[in-house]
Image: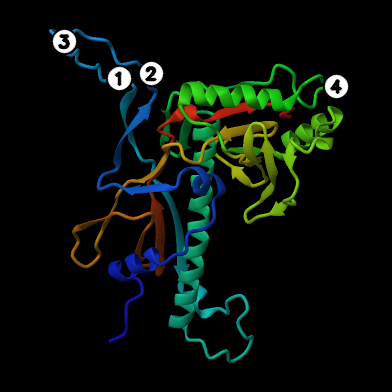
Amino acid sequence: MPIDIFAPATLDIAVKQLPQAPSFLRDKFFKRVQLEPTKKIIFDVYKGKRRVAPFVSENNKSPVAEKIGYTTNEATAPLVSVKDVTNIEDIMKRTAGETLINSGISPDERALTLLAQTMTDFDEMITRREEVMCAQALFEGKINVIGEDVNYTIDFGLTNKGTASVLWDAESSTADPTEDLKAWASQCAIKGYRTPDTCVMSRNAYNAFVGRCMALGYFDQKNFIDVSIKPERLEGGVTYVGRLLDPSIELYVYEEWYIDDWTTPGTPVEKPIIPKGHILLGSTSAKATFYYGCLTFTDPITKAFRTIMNRRGADSWVQKDPDARMFKLCARPLPVPQEVDAWYAAKVAASE
């Protein structure tokens, strides 16, 4: 008996075997992944205090410590969904790369190829949405959920953000980027209890950093930057450019873009994932979790609801007149920077 590739059980297996597309901010800072059995995500945001244990008399009871330092929040993991329609004509036509005449590929085999390609394309689209959400959470401290019939904000209460007192690329700038980085790293340690080990920059922010450091003669100092490792082009628009010795942080330039078609509907705008002129200082050991809420579909055979816990969920059904098959890939992603002040987002160069 042939396997129905569109059966719910088959789709669930196929989705689980999808290779995870690279996503720099998600993979660098949100290494912990948690699948939830509901669409409501409950998480803690830590903003502790450095309290000192009190002195007490031997004749008195020890005081009960007040439970402070974190707040418990609840948010609905936003639903992200992409749908495709395949009609009879699609599976009868030659696909890209297929032999022009007598390819030997049947319509059923062609349908399988189309499904695999569609699933991969949709997964990359959802991954890009996840990366945009990570950037919003880290740079703005909130995620703006804007789409058709949905408009709300998930706010994590970020306070570690600001603007350099003197922009690094300002005309006749007197800025010292290293002093700015030291000050912001201290803020991460004071408010977020983490020492940053990574700095992610937009391209023009990095160019401004290099320009000021050259003007100040820092690159002539052996104790300034580790130049034994040459800049390395990584996957997904990322360049590793070396390690600063004081403060001790790895430097990355991140050049990846996305199409914003929701801020101004009808007027899509291409935007960088890292806001132009901005940098992010962060600790890769800070507590940050990437949550995935559960997904619920109807089973076309049993007519009952089925719920799955996974990074992705797939569904498919057939419509009549005109005959077509629908395929949908969904996710409920929610990146949560729980130790929110362990990061510092700053504007250091021109943003326009």
Closer to the camera in the image, 302 or 36: 36
Mark 2 surroundings: few (<14), some (14-19) or many (≥20) residues within 10 A: few
| Residue 231, x across and y down, in percent | 73, 50
- Front disc: 4 or 1: 1
Is residue 127 toward the left or the right of residue 318 in the image? Answer: right
Q: Earlier in the sequence, mark 4 or mark 2?
A: 2
42 vs 7: above or below:
above
Q: What whole-number distance in Å separates the C-alpha atoms at marks 3 and 2? A: 26 Å
Q: What whole-number distance in Å separates the C-alpha atoms at marks 4 and 1? A: 46 Å
Q: Are marks 1 and 2 in contact (CB under 8 Å)?
A: yes
In percent of the image, x 32 and y 29: which residue is there?
Answer: 73
- Amino acid residing under circle 1: Ile
Residue tagged 2:
49
| Residue 144, x across and y down, in percent | 48, 32
Is residue 201 toward the left or the right of residue 114 in the image? Answer: right
Q: Earlier in the sequence, mark 1 or mark 2?
A: 2
Residue tagged 1:
68
**Label ID, residue 274:** none
Q: Earlier in the sequence, mark 3 or mark 4?
A: 3
187 vs 97: above or below:
above
- Secondary structure of the residue carrying numbered label 2: loop
Residue tagged 3:
58
In percent of the image, x 25 and y 65: which residue is there?
Answer: 300
| Residue 109, x across and y down, in percent | 46, 82
How many numbered badges does the structure rendering display? Answer: 4
- Amino acid residing under circle 4: Glu
